[in-house]
Image: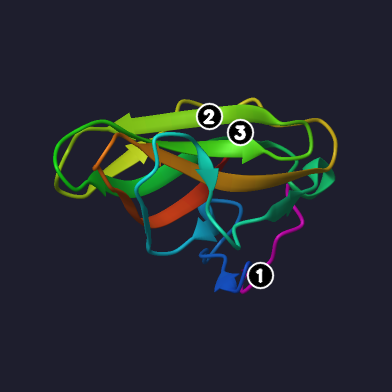
Protein backbone atom coordinates (compact mmCIF):
# COMPACT_ATOMS: atom_id res chain seq x y z
CA UNK A 1 0.00 0.00 0.00
CA UNK A 2 0.96 3.65 -0.34
CA UNK A 3 3.05 5.42 2.23
CA UNK A 4 0.37 8.07 2.81
CA UNK A 5 -0.75 8.70 6.35
CA UNK A 6 -3.80 10.47 7.71
CA UNK A 7 -3.22 14.21 7.68
CA UNK A 8 -0.71 14.27 4.79
CA UNK A 9 -0.57 17.81 3.37
CA UNK A 10 -0.29 18.43 -0.37
CA UNK A 11 -0.32 21.90 -1.99
CA UNK A 12 -1.51 23.34 1.31
CA UNK A 13 -4.52 21.03 1.45
CA UNK A 14 -4.93 18.00 3.66
CA UNK A 15 -5.32 14.54 2.10
CA UNK A 16 -8.73 13.27 3.21
CA UNK A 17 -8.84 9.74 4.57
CA UNK A 18 -9.74 7.92 7.74
CA UNK A 19 -8.35 4.51 6.80
CA UNK A 20 -6.07 4.48 3.79
CA UNK A 21 -6.49 0.74 3.30
CA UNK A 22 -10.29 0.85 2.82
CA UNK A 23 -11.33 4.24 1.46
CA UNK A 24 -10.53 6.48 -1.44
CA UNK A 25 -7.89 9.13 -0.87
CA UNK A 26 -8.17 12.66 -2.30
CA UNK A 27 -5.00 14.52 -3.29
CA UNK A 28 -6.11 18.13 -3.98
CA UNK A 29 -4.61 19.97 -6.95
CA UNK A 30 -6.62 23.21 -6.80
CA UNK A 31 -9.39 25.03 -5.02
CA UNK A 32 -11.78 27.55 -6.61
CA UNK A 33 -10.55 28.86 -9.94
CA UNK A 34 -12.09 30.46 -13.03
CA UNK A 35 -10.61 31.35 -16.42
CA UNK A 36 -11.69 32.49 -19.87
CA UNK A 37 -9.18 31.19 -22.41
CA UNK A 38 -9.57 29.45 -25.77
CA UNK A 39 -6.37 27.45 -25.21
CA UNK A 40 -5.15 25.29 -22.33
CA UNK A 41 -3.48 27.30 -19.60
CA UNK A 42 -2.02 26.15 -16.31
CA UNK A 43 -3.83 27.01 -13.11
CA UNK A 44 -1.22 28.85 -11.03
CA UNK A 45 0.00 27.06 -7.92
CA UNK A 46 -1.25 23.58 -8.81
CA UNK A 47 2.12 21.86 -9.31
CA UNK A 48 2.21 18.43 -7.71
CA UNK A 49 5.33 16.25 -7.65
CA UNK A 50 4.10 12.75 -8.42
CA UNK A 51 6.41 10.02 -7.10
CA UNK A 52 5.12 6.57 -8.15
CA UNK A 53 6.89 4.72 -5.31
CA UNK A 54 4.63 6.56 -2.84
CA UNK A 55 1.45 5.18 -4.41
CA UNK A 56 1.78 1.42 -4.85
CA UNK A 57 -1.35 -0.71 -5.51
CA UNK A 58 -3.72 2.17 -6.24
CA UNK A 59 -5.95 3.07 -9.17
CA UNK A 60 -5.94 6.78 -10.00
CA UNK A 61 -8.76 9.00 -11.23
CA UNK A 62 -8.81 12.69 -12.11
CA UNK A 63 -11.82 14.46 -10.58
CA UNK A 64 -13.11 18.01 -10.95
CA UNK A 65 -16.18 19.74 -9.58
CA UNK A 66 -16.73 22.23 -12.37
CA UNK A 67 -19.05 24.04 -14.73
CA UNK A 68 -19.33 26.39 -17.69
CA UNK A 69 -20.76 29.83 -17.00
CA UNK A 70 -22.97 29.76 -20.11
CA UNK A 71 -23.48 26.15 -21.20
CA UNK A 72 -20.67 25.96 -23.75
CA UNK A 73 -17.97 23.29 -23.55
CA UNK A 74 -15.13 23.67 -21.02
CA UNK A 75 -12.20 21.30 -20.45
CA UNK A 76 -10.19 20.47 -17.33
CA UNK A 77 -6.87 18.70 -17.93
CA UNK A 78 -4.47 16.78 -15.71
CA UNK A 79 -1.15 17.63 -17.31
CA UNK A 80 2.35 16.16 -17.03
CA UNK A 81 4.56 19.29 -17.12
CA UNK A 82 7.80 17.32 -17.09
CA UNK A 83 7.08 15.61 -20.43
CA UNK A 84 4.50 18.10 -21.81
CA UNK A 85 1.79 15.39 -22.04
CA UNK A 86 -1.88 15.27 -21.22
CA UNK A 87 -2.78 12.51 -18.75
CA UNK A 88 -6.56 13.07 -18.69
CA UNK A 89 -9.24 15.53 -19.79
CA UNK A 90 -12.76 15.85 -18.41
CA UNK A 91 -15.30 18.19 -20.03
CA UNK A 92 -18.75 19.61 -19.44
CA UNK A 93 -21.30 21.98 -20.95
CA UNK A 94 -23.30 22.16 -17.72
CA UNK A 95 -23.94 25.61 -16.27
CA UNK A 96 -24.40 24.09 -12.80
CA UNK A 97 -21.60 22.39 -10.88
CA UNK A 98 -21.11 18.72 -11.75
CA UNK A 99 -18.59 16.16 -10.53
CA UNK A 100 -16.48 14.97 -13.45
CA UNK A 101 -14.35 11.86 -12.97
CA UNK A 102 -12.05 10.26 -15.53
CA UNK A 103 -11.69 6.56 -16.22
CA UNK A 104 -8.78 4.82 -14.47
CA UNK A 105 -5.57 6.65 -15.40
CA UNK A 106 -2.24 5.34 -16.57
CA UNK A 107 0.12 7.29 -14.36
CA UNK A 108 3.78 8.03 -15.15
CA UNK A 109 6.29 5.37 -14.11
CA UNK A 110 8.85 7.92 -12.94
CA UNK A 111 8.75 11.09 -10.83
CA UNK A 112 6.91 13.87 -12.73
CA UNK A 113 5.46 17.31 -12.04
CA UNK A 114 1.71 17.35 -12.66
CA UNK A 115 -0.68 20.32 -12.76
CA UNK A 116 -4.21 21.36 -13.60
CA UNK A 117 -4.90 23.13 -16.90
CA UNK A 118 -8.21 24.53 -18.11
CA UNK A 119 -9.70 25.91 -21.31
CA UNK A 120 -13.03 27.37 -22.42
CA UNK A 121 -14.52 28.90 -25.54
CA UNK A 122 -14.67 32.56 -26.50
CA UNK A 123 -16.53 34.52 -23.80
CA UNK A 124 -17.04 31.30 -21.80
CA UNK A 125 -15.62 30.77 -18.32
CA UNK A 126 -14.39 27.40 -17.07
CA UNK A 127 -15.00 27.32 -13.33
CA UNK A 128 -13.90 24.68 -10.83
CA UNK A 129 -14.37 24.50 -7.08
CA UNK A 130 -11.95 21.59 -6.62
CA UNK A 131 -9.64 19.51 -8.79
CA UNK A 132 -7.97 16.44 -7.35
CA UNK A 133 -6.47 13.03 -7.86
CA UNK A 134 -8.56 10.26 -6.35
CA UNK A 135 -6.81 7.07 -5.28
CA UNK A 136 -8.70 3.81 -4.81
CA UNK A 137 -7.07 0.62 -3.54
CA UNK A 138 -6.43 -1.68 -6.51
Which is nearer the eye, 71 or 100?
71
Quarter where residue 53 is shown = top right
Q: CA distance from mark 1 to mark 2?
A: 24 Å
Front: mark 1 or 2: 2
> What segment is highlighted magenta in the picture?
1-9
Asked which secondary structure carries label 2, the reply is strand
Q: Which residue is mark 3?
A: 138
Residue in the image at 50% along x and 37% along y = 40
Q: Which residue is mark 2?
A: 88
Residue in the image at 38% along x and 64% along y = 32
Q: Earlier in the sequence, mark 1 or mark 3?
A: 1
Left or right of 89 on screen, residue 106: right
Asked which secondary structure carries label 1, the reply is loop
| Labels 1 & 2 near each other (Cβ < 8 A) | no
| Labels 3 & 2 near each other (Cβ < 8 A) | no
Dominant secondary structure, magenta: loop
Amino acid sequence: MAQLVKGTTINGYQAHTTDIHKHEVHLPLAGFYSMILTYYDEVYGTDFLFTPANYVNYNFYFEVNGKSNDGYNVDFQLYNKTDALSIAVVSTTSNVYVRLRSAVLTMPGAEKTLCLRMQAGTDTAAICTIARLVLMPA
